[in-house]
Image: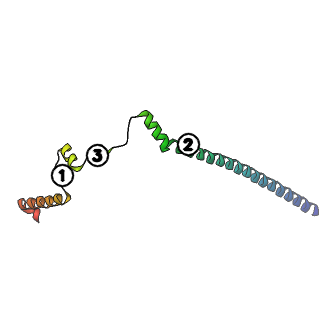
Amino acid sequence: MMRLTMFLLCLLLAGAAAGRYQAEAAVRETRNELRRLERVKAEELTSIQLLRAEVAFLESPDRLTAIAGEMTDLEPLSGAQLLTAEDFEIAFGGDVVSPAEASGAARAETVAVAALDPAAGR
């Protein structure tokens, strides 16, 4: 009986050792994967910083001004190019109506419609 118990305990010990070895191997593999992912993360962060710096350079106003000067003949607006309200009215030939006049005209139109259509006044 003692030999059978000793044999079973040895098997149990061997099984526990094998389980611990498998657990340690899994932990080691997981740590290696974690290190790999941290390296990839660091590379991606570096890449993001590089791309942000590149975008900042490409969007810099001085650079864009230089390119616009080379490619186009555009210039800033001068005061002579701006229209006054009277010039706008002359150029586009429309009657300029103030907001107060517009609301009064709308009320007058509503009263006229109500006078013509008795059902609309109800």
- The residue where tag 3 is placed is 82
Secondary structure beneath label 1: loop
Q: Residue drawn 57% across and 45% down?
A: 53
Residues 23 and 67: in front is 67
* Residue located beneath label 2 in the image: 54
Instruction: State whether residue 116 is above or below residue 63.
Output: below
Quadrant housing residue 73: top left
Spatial CA span between label 3 and label 2: 37 Å
Q: Nearer the viewer, residue 88 or 94?
A: 88
Estimate the spatial distance between the alpha carbons at disc 1 and disc 2, rounded to whole Å: 49 Å
Q: Is residue 111 left or right of residue 68?
A: left
Picture coordinates of residue 32 (x, y %)? 73, 49
Q: Earlier in the sequence, mark 3 or mark 1?
A: 3
Q: Earlier in the sequence, mark 3 or mark 2?
A: 2
Q: Which residue is mark 1?
A: 96
**x and y percentages locating residue 47 in the rendered image:** 61, 44
Image marks 3 and 1: residues in contact by CB distance under 8 Å: no
Nearer-N-terminus badge (1/2): 2
Q: Residues within 10 Å of mark 2 (few under 14, many from 20)?
A: few
Amino acid at pointer 2: Glu
